[in-house]
Image: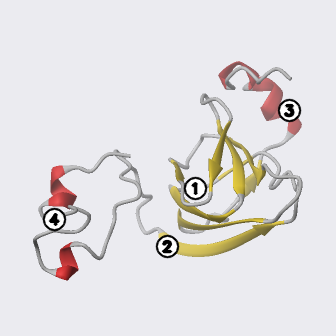
Amino acid sequence: MSENAQHAHHGHGTGDADGPSWTRAAKMLQDASPITVPEGASAMTIHVEWEPGDPGTPPHRHSGPAFGYVTKGAVRFELEGEPERVIEAGGTFWEPGGDAIHYQDGNALSDEKTEFVVTMMCAPGKPMLELVDEAELKERAHLRAPRPTA
């Protein structure tokens, strides 16, 4: 997560202890760039709640970028080309959307619920989420990061 000059010059998330309260009220959690938002996109924000050990959504993709914040528990997160990682409460994630496969978004905890909020930009006329079939997963297997060993 980086704080770039464009965001900082507006006063939000700058951490200026001597400035007015509005300059301290917002804290930058993530700064993703570059992003591509489909022309004519709509945006939706959803709340996801996974029961303990729930593997989450099967491999899928989104038509536009998605930005998430984990509010409780821990998410097991994996995007095509990136190693699997666990994002704990207070952490953020983003994905570019488009062609990239989102392999995992499930609960990394076996003993408690996990919750997150995600805002997604959706291309017009496309579903928010499109599942990826087994044939495509096999065809693109070379693009997936190596799996962790037990």
Q: Quadrant of residue 117?
A: bottom right
**Alpha carbon of mark 2 to alpha carbon of mark 3: how far?**
30 Å
Q: How many marks?
A: 4
The front one of 72 and 2 is: 72
Q: Looking at this view, name the residue that lies furthest to the front.
A: 18
Identify the mark at residue 135; answer none if there is no mark.
3
Label ID, residue 42: 2
Q: Amino acid at mark 1?
A: Ser
| Residue contact between numbered discs 4 and 3, judged by CB atoms under 8 Å | no
Name the kind of residue labelled 4 in the image: Asp
Ranked by sequence position, the earlier of labels 4 and 3 is 4
Q: Position of residue 27 (x, y in %)?
A: 33, 65
x 17%, y 67%: residue: 17
Q: Which residue is mark 1?
A: 63
Q: Is residue 125 left or right of residue 140?
A: left
> What is the spatial separation of the Cα atoms under label 4 and label 3, in whole angstroms?
52 Å
Question: Quick check: 102 left or right of 134?
Answer: left
Q: Give x and y (percent) for residue 8.
A: 18, 59
Residue plotted at (50% across, 55% down): 65
Residue under the image location 35 percent in, 52 percent down: 31
Q: Mark 4 to mark 2: distance in Å? A: 34 Å
Q: Which residue is mark 4?
A: 16
Quarter-of-image position of residue 46: bottom right
Label 2 element class:
strand
